[in-house]
Amino acid sequence: MSKFTALLAIRTIFYILPSLLFLAFGTAFPSLAVGVKAQGESAIPSRAGKEKAARVVAVAIFNALLGVALQTGTELLFTEVFHMRSGIKVTASLPTPWGIAKDLLSAFAICGVLHYHIHRYVLHSESSSYLSRWHSTWQHSVRAPYAFVATYDHPICYIPSHWVPTYAPALLFRFHVLTCHLFTALVSLEEALVYSGYSVLPSTIVFPGMARRTNAHFTSKGKGNFGVWVLLDWLSGTTVAGGKDVVDDVGDEMEKHGAARRASGAIENGKGMVEGAKERLSGAETGDRKSKRSERRQMRKESVPSIEGE
């Protein structure tokens, strides 16, 4: 029961609560949220309807809790039913920092590879399987992603695409419980930020480019960017080139608010200030030269009478 409580707390603190905060910000302050959303006004969850947003939140939280229940149930299956050792190592001695870092790197690598291949070849299968149709009509019914969309999918799609890649590395390497919980926390935070849809804020500071790539995956209707990390898409040639739709949407928003005109005016003003400074500096130098010549002439005039007087 303590494992369930710990996992529930981690998913709540690092995924559900941040997602709720992002949603509350976009709902309470839509005019502010529009300015920092990659797709502008269309990315505000309430624009798709309150019923749709409520359904997304409910399903997303259900799937997050389903993952916690599945992991806890798997552990109980190992220990209580099959009388095997736990899939997660629980010892009094803590792993070393280097051991934790090494395990985390291995976990992210395996998680990334599994997620990419399942996402591309199962959820976006060209054979139009049940899973690909469910994924299309559930998660991809949302055009502009926001944090809760990370786990919004048909539960049968969520299990192989998100839960399996996250839990598999812990079983494969039999992580220490501390490492397992730390990895779950990092993945939870990654989901909330990468699917946030924000063009600024932590999603592009802590995870550079990842939120933009996820946004491009949705605007391209799943034609590419199947992995969270760019490497596998780049090697496989499935990168959505620059997220063109995202760039177009941002350009439209900038034109709508006259950002381009203001930027052009600022540049012209800057040029004018530089030219004015140059003219003042040139005038000052010319004045200094004239003043020095005048002083020298005055000194020569004053010196002539004194010589004649002698």
Image (cartoon, rainbow, N blue to C red):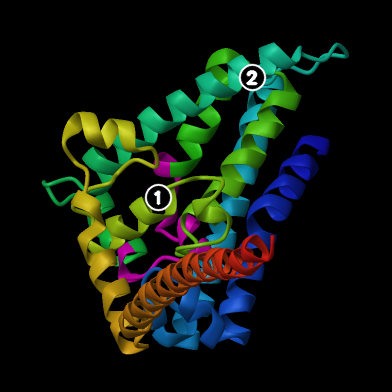
Residue labelled with disc 2: 101
Residue type (three-letter) at the residue carrying disc 1? Ile
Q: Residue at x 41, y 65 (%)?
A: 145
Q: Residue at x 66, y 41 (%)?
A: 185
Distance from the alpha carbon under mark 1 to that under mark 2: 32 Å
Quarter in which the C terminus is drawn: bottom right
Q: Give percent across and percent down for residue 29.
A: 60, 85
Which range of residues does the magenta coloring cover?
Answer: 140-161
In reply to whether residue 229 is colored magenta, the answer given is no
Residue labelled with disc 1: 156
Which residue lies most toward the left here?
127
Q: Give percent across and percent down for residue 59.
A: 51, 65
Q: Is residue 148 left or right of residue 226?
A: right
Q: Quadrant of residue 140?
A: bottom left
Whether 155 is drawn above or below 84: the answer is below
Q: Is residue 290 left or right of residue 139?
A: right
Quarter in which the N terminus is drawn: top right
Q: Give percent across and percent down for residue 58.
A: 56, 69
- Report the front residue among 199 and 306: 306
